[in-house]
Image: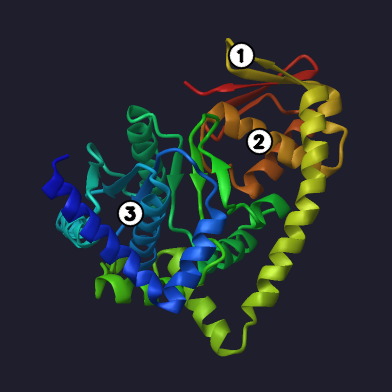
Amino acid sequence: MNQKSLSAQSKTHKKILSYLKDKEILRIFNEFENSLNVKNKFAVAVSGGPDSLALAFLAKCFAIKNSVDVKYLIVDHKLRKESSTEAKNVVMILKKIGVSCKILVWKGKKPSSNIQSAARDKRYSLLVEECKKNKIKSILLGHHLDDLFENFLIRILRGSGLNGLISLNKNTKYKDNDIKVLRPLLDIEKKNLTYLSKKIFNLYINDPSNKNENFKRIRIRNLMSSLEKEGLNKKKFLLTINNLKDSNKSIKFYVDKNIEKNSIYLKKKNSFILNLNFFDQAHEVIFRSLTKIIQKIGEKYYPVRGKSISELIKKIKSYSFTKVTLGGCFIEKINKSILISKEN
């Protein structure tokens, strides 16, 4: 890079960091920085909403202060005719803070049902594929505190167990590989991120699907808004979730022991054999052990719904059980053991 380019870059960096003089923006950045435990280059998944743009800005500040290489990515699902234009607009918006954002396009046939779930899965797969190409081990997502609450309520409506209720964490792995999914905004409310985005960018992209009450998440979001007006205390809500997380750690210990002692993983065949003792545990331990194994073999980012796992356990314990498919897996009884293998 020549001297002129270096000088221009230095001015841009100073301008970006000058926004941290705003006390509220500095507070948000400090929370973000304290949550982000990365030393090497990472990727940032952008969508164009206020939380996403805030994440892009915070990541840029972090990159400047710590001399870390960051790659910014946006997925164009092509589910709406406006999506490509919106993606290009986001790219232009981010140029204001010296960010170059790459558009990843979902090609091929689109689903007619479970659209949000399919789009989410495709988004993750495109992001991970791009990270692997660039030898990046961490992806930052813009999930925030309001998302944590929404996720909790959605899982309650689905009848999820304890693990499902608190499934949104700051640091997880994508499927069973080395790509880490990081959520450094999980302690920050959406309203604070919206404040930041308005200050930095003066605008953001409004996805019309965020107002479509055909989607359960949008109905839950509207419910949360109503509960806030009725005096919902978010701090107490968060305290409840954190207490549940502590209990969850204890159960995980017994789940790992159950899998270790009562199952065999056949690496070459990518399958598990479960013995009778596997099902001679507390229901929650069986439930989670089975969920974890099916998620691993089926190679799904999200686990199978709790209701389906509970029904599977009942079937397995019955004398008539032979074979079912669930979560991309074949689950079958062979003599006195259960074989779980990947569905072709």
- CB of mark 1 within 8 Å of CB of mark 3? no
Q: Which mark is residue 46?
A: 3
Q: Give the residue type at disc 3.
A: Val
Q: Tell me what residue is drawn at x 36 percent, y 52 percent.
A: 64
| Residue ID at (82%, 47%) | 250
- How would you rate the neighbour count of disc 3 (Cα within 10 Å): few for under 14, some for 14-19, many for 20 or more? many
Please state if 180 lies on the left or on the right of 314 as rendered.
Answer: left
Relative placement, left or right, of 280 versus 218 is: right
Residue of label 2 = 292
Placement of 21 over or under 113, stated as above or below:
below
Residue 208 x, y percent position in the rendering: 28, 68
From the viewer's side, name the closer residue of 327 and 297: 297
Under mark 1, the amino acid is Lys
Q: Residue furthest top?
A: 268
Can residue 284 be seen here? The reply is no
Residue 12 image point, x, y percent: 23, 59
What label does residue 267 carry, if any? 1
Q: Residue furthest bottom?
A: 230
- Image location of residue 10, percent across then percent down: 24, 55
